[in-house]
Amino acid sequence: MPVTDRVHEVREEVTQLASAALTAEDLMRRMVRLLHERMLKYNWVGFYMLEPGAQPPMLVLGAFEGAMTPHTRIPLNEGICGAAASSGQTVVVDDVSKDPRYLACSLETKSEIVVPVFVHGKVVGELDIDSHFPAAFTAEHQELVQYCALLVGKKMEASGQ
Ligand code: SME
């Protein structure tokens, strides 16, 4: 199946998940499973959420699929994860070996995308995906991952978070 068709299919599937999920936590658990299963180059998929009230702010590993990572807590001044959460911008790294910010999760990881999750305009966490393939996150993948992060933010808003 051409990758564009797969991206469109998975977009539909996450849309359905978002309407079926009872809570944002439920949505995040089901979303990481779906993305990991359906997108062959998404080799690690997980959420990091900002710890409520933590000073200094801290990203804490939430729902994920893939190998266990040594990075379960990431301060905002560390890693690609910290860069995305502190800037509120999507960060795409085509070759992690060339990015000094990169915190290694698996020796096999070649590229990464991190997309912030917003609730009422504020970053509350992020969706992080690693690939064993270089430059896996082309524009159509960025759009899909941003859409997934948007759905989670909307679900959190709808549940009063
Ligand atoms: N690579 C991330 C750390 C998290 S692991 O990829 C799961 C980073 O540089 O922030």
Image (cartoon, rainbow, N blue to C red):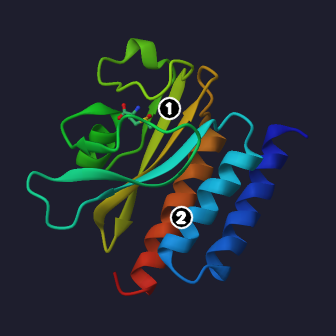
Q: Is residue 83 above or below residue 108?
A: below
* Residue neighbourhood size for the residue with mark 1, other residues' Cα within 10 Å, grouped as few (<14), some (14–19), many (≥20): many
For the residue labelled by badge 2, is the local secondary structure a helix, a strand or a loop? helix
Residue labelled with disc 1: 112
Of tags 2 and 1, the one toward the viewer is 2
The quadrant holding residue 91 is top left
Q: Secondary structure at mark 1?
A: strand
Q: Residue at x 50, y 25 (%)?
A: 106
Q: Position of residue 97 (x, y in %)?
A: 43, 13
Q: Is residue 140 left or right of residue 85?
A: right
Image quadrant in which the C terminus is located: bottom left
Q: Residue at (52%, 53%) from the top-left corner?
A: 146
Q: Is mark 1 within 8 Å of ligand 1?
A: yes
Residue 78 to residue 117: above or below: above
In terms of image quadrants, where is residue 137? top right
Q: Residue 28: give its label.
A: 2
Circle nearer the N terminus (2, 1): 2
Relative height, residue 32 to residue 71 (above, below): below
What is the residue that sits farthest to the right in this orientation? 1
Indicate whether 145 appears above or below 13: above
What's the residue at 72%, 74% (across, down)?
A: 16
> How many numbered circles are shown?
2
- Residue type at mark 2 is Met
Q: Indicate the amino acid at tag 1.
A: Glu
Q: In which quarter of the view is residue 132 placed?
A: top right
Rendered location of residue 99, percent (x, y)? 36, 18
Where ligand 1 lies, by image quadrant? Answer: top left
